[in-house]
Amino acid sequence: GAEGAVAGEAASEVVGDWEALKAEGNRRYVADDFEGAIAKYGEAIAVFEAGVGDEPEEQEQRSKLAILCTNRAAATLQIVRRMRERERCKPGAALPPDMRRLCMRANIDASRGVELDPDNAKAWLRKGQASLWMSAMQQRAKDAVRCFEVAQASRSLPASMRNEAEQWLKIARKMLDDQTDMPENCPQM
């Protein structure tokens, strides 16, 4: 009895802590403090994993952890987007090493989100964006097209993000087309 109650209280404290950290990350994200948001989401992930592990068995816990990873990926991609705008870089253009590292980190977080919860459309969207921004390689563009198609097909994609997913899918398809050689004597459509 008493031990179970203490363990239950400790578990609920951990849940409360990670939720408060997530909420603080969300506040910082909305305030355009993306570095601060990344830090808070990272703390929330660490606290959450301390409570349930990094591979939770229950789908509800997997989904919550996927959201934290996806939120951190989104904040990281916002930093990259701002850097790209300042540098006037287009998707697929060669990235400076610091930007490339951020894209790779966002890709890891979004990929983990997809792994934890394959129905998380936002994770698929962020994974596609990170893939496209890393480089213009044909395989990355192909992976990004798949990510955006999965995101668009998902019922979990908010209506407010459908246009964003469609625009990214168009960019990914164009990059894939640009990277794919046509066979000789093949008529162009």
Image (cartoon, rainbow, N blue to C red):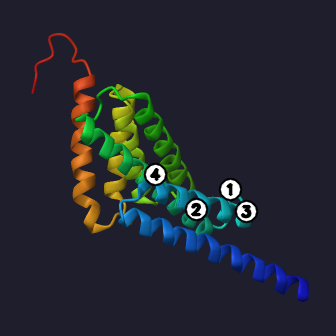
> Which amino acid type is shown beneath numbered disc 2?
Leu
> Which amino acid type is shown beneath numbered disc 1?
Asp
- Between the residue at mark 3 and the residue at mark 1, the CA separation in whole angstroms equals 8 Å
Q: Are circles 2 and 1 on residues that touch, CB within 8 Å?
A: yes
> Which amino acid type is shown beneath numbered disc 4?
Ala
- Between the residue at mark 3 and the residue at mark 4, the CA separation in whole angstroms equals 20 Å
Residue 72, how many percent across, how many down? 48, 55
* Badge 4: residue crowd in 10 Å (few <14, some 14–19, many ≥20): many
Q: Secondary structure at mark 1?
A: loop
Q: Secondary structure at mark 3?
A: helix
| Residue 170 shows in this picture | yes
As drawn, is 98 to the left or to the right of 45?
A: left
Q: Residue at x 35, y 63 (%)?
A: 157
Q: Residue at x 32, y 28 (%)?
A: 136
Residue 148, how many percent across, how many down? 33, 48
Q: Residue at x 23, y 40 (%)?
A: 171
Q: Secondary structure at mark 4?
A: helix
179 lies above or below 7: above
Say which residue label 1 marks: 54
Q: Secondary structure at mark 2?
A: helix
As drawn, is 142 to the left or to the right of 85?
A: right
Instruction: Kindly identify which numbered label has been placed on residue 65.
Output: 2
* Badge 1: residue crowd in 10 Å (few <14, some 14–19, many ≥20): some
Say which residue label 4 marks: 73
Q: Earlier in the sequence, mark 4 or mark 2?
A: 2
